[in-house]
Amino acid sequence: MSTIQPVAPPPLPGDHATAVDLGTARTRIFAELGKAVVGQQAVIEQILIALVAGGHCLITGAPGLAKTLLVKSIARVFHLDFRRIQFTPDLMPTDIVGVEILQEQAGQRQLVFVPGPIFGNLILADEINRTPPKTQAALLEAMQEQQVTAAGRRHALPDPFFVLATQNPIEMEGTYPLPEAQLDRFMFNVVIDYLPEDEEVAVIQRTTAAAGAQPEPLFTGEDVLRFHALVRKVPIAEDLVRWAVRLAASTRPGQAAAPDFVKNWVNWGAGTRAAQFLTLGAKARALLHGRSHVTREDLVALALPVLRHRVLVNYRAEAENVGVETVIQRLLERMP
């Protein structure tokens, strides 16, 4: 496969400054987040890539792994309006979107829309899989269209707008698996695992001592919007786009080109949105690493977070103790 990169057009002065800001700020962002969160470098980078690219993130991990703290710290570093929604079994859609109430003004009664907590820049949907599907679906329109509809009226959400949803492992009691249509709206599924022993010791020492320094803001919402525009200008070779498309297509068991192990283990594969997010995420990763073009390494690095929630394994794979990550790794190994 050719890896020749296309010649990029000369960058505008504003674009160049934005790229320099983003490329040099990666170390500073990690340093500020390190004041609150110990370790989890790969997790932080994946969330930053989604933020820079303008995508939503699903964060999966057991309770007590600092998922909420991480999201709050990122909102502080980027100086975004942060809202937290605690999802519970009795939460209603109007508790998220908002509701119209009857008010009396100038001797007349009229319905007035009271915005819900979703009207912010960075929304933490905490334990999203502990609420029934009816309430989970309240986020669908917001995530896709950046608006909500209440009583037939559309209300635009702030810009930028991100949903970072945390969920407990599906095997835990009292969880409701997210429907496939909603899972597909998330750019990444980021998995947080337990820390190594040394980092866990550092967490205990830090959290049982006096409060330390807090992360300082480095950017604003306007900076984030400039990052979004710049990411879409990053050039990528056609053969790399084709690689992303073929990787997504190879997860679909119904296609003739799918390998035998996919046909045996996979019940449902990834759609076109997977290749879109893989390409967009690779562009953002290139900028964060100080490069002005995409490489195959960028695509490979993001394959797992992009695909792990879009590929559904069947009962045969579960019986053979084969997880979705095993399937994706085998696909990456056979890609040219």
Image (tube, rainbow, N blue to C red):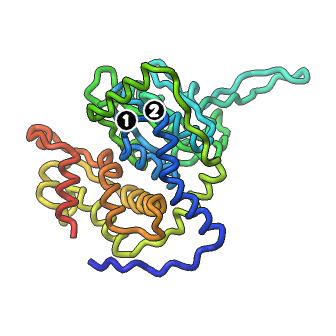
- Identify the residue position indicated by label 2 in the image: 136
Q: Which quadrant is home to the C terminus?
A: bottom left
User: Distance of mark 2 from mark 1, alpha carbons?
Assistant: 7 Å
Q: Residues within 10 Å of mark 2 (few under 14, many from 20)?
A: many
Q: Looking at the image, which residue sits at the far left?
A: 320
- Kind of residue at badge 2: Gln
* Closer to the camera in the image, 179 or 311: 311
**Number of numbered tags placed on the structure image:** 2
Q: Relative to residue 255, is residue 239 drawn left or right?
A: right
Residue 138 in sight in this render? no
Spot occupied by residue 325 in the image (x, y as percentages of width and height) = 22, 47
Q: Relative to residue 27, is residue 303 drawn left or right?
A: left
Spot occupied by residue 9 in the image (x, y as percentages of width and height) = 55, 79
- Identify the residue position indicated by label 1 in the image: 178
Spot occupied by residue 42 in the image (x, y as percentages of width and height) = 36, 47
Residue 89 in sight in this render? yes
Q: Secondary structure at mark 2?
A: helix
Question: Image point 31% across, 55% down: which residue?
Answer: 303
Q: Which quadrant is home to the N terminus?
A: bottom left
- Kind of residue at badge 1: Leu
* Closer to the camera in the image, 119 or 97: 119
Q: Earlier in the sequence, mark 2 or mark 1?
A: 2
Instruction: Give the number of the disc on residue 210.
Output: none
Displayed quadrant of residue 88: top left
Spot occupied by residue 83 in the image (x, y as percentages of width and height) = 58, 32
Question: Image point 41% across, 62% down: which residue?
Answer: 279
Q: Secondary structure at mark 1?
A: loop
Q: Are marks 2 and 1 in contact (CB under 8 Å)?
A: yes
